[in-house]
Amino acid sequence: MRHLKRTAKLGRTSEHRNAMLANLVCSLIEHKRVTTTLAKAKAARSVAEKMVTLGKKGTIHHRRLAVARLHQESAAKTLFNDIAPAFKDRRSGYTRIIKLEQRQGDAAQRAILEWVDTIVPAVSPEAPAEVKPEEKK
């Protein structure tokens, strides 16, 4: 039986996996969006949502827990000052996963992990970018 065995191993040791997920969440905090494989995005989603929950509580104890998990004080500071206050009225579901095409080299399913308040720019293939005509002198 697989009861209570939810951790995605991702083919790594526990130390390597924890460091990779911490780096992925720090990149998400810094850049608001990361592109990775679907399995890593699903694993990082739970870490990111737990960090936002710590950020919403905002005590010094919760800051120390976040820094201990993320290993970057600048990411924890951005989390507590910018990201967590934006989600103060939201109970859960702080991130979204958008599936992309498969990667060419190994056919891994790719995905975008981003915060839900991020506006996704719509790119239509029919509308080319505007080209400004050059001014004649």
Image (cartoon, helix red, strand yellow):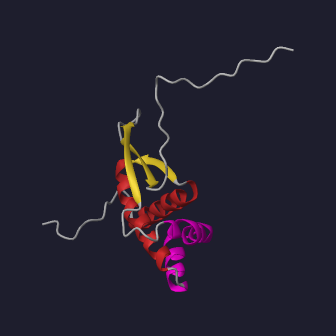
The residues colored magenta run: 60-86
Q: Position of residue 91 (x, y in %)?
A: 37, 70
Q: Residue 85 lies in magenta, yes or no?
A: yes
Magenta segment's dominant SS is helix
Q: Quadrant of residue 92?
A: bottom left
| Quadrant, the C terminus | top right
Quarter occupied by residue 76: bottom right
Compared across the picture, whether 115 is left or right of 2 comes to right
Residue at screen point 35% across, 36% down: 107
**Among all residues in the image, which is located at the extreme left?**
1
Left or right of 26 in this view: 97: left
Image point (23%, 67%), residue name: 5
Q: Residue at 69% x, 22% y: name it.
A: 132
Give x and y (percent) for residue 60. 55, 85
Q: Is residue 4 magenta?
A: no
In this view, 122 is above or below 71: above
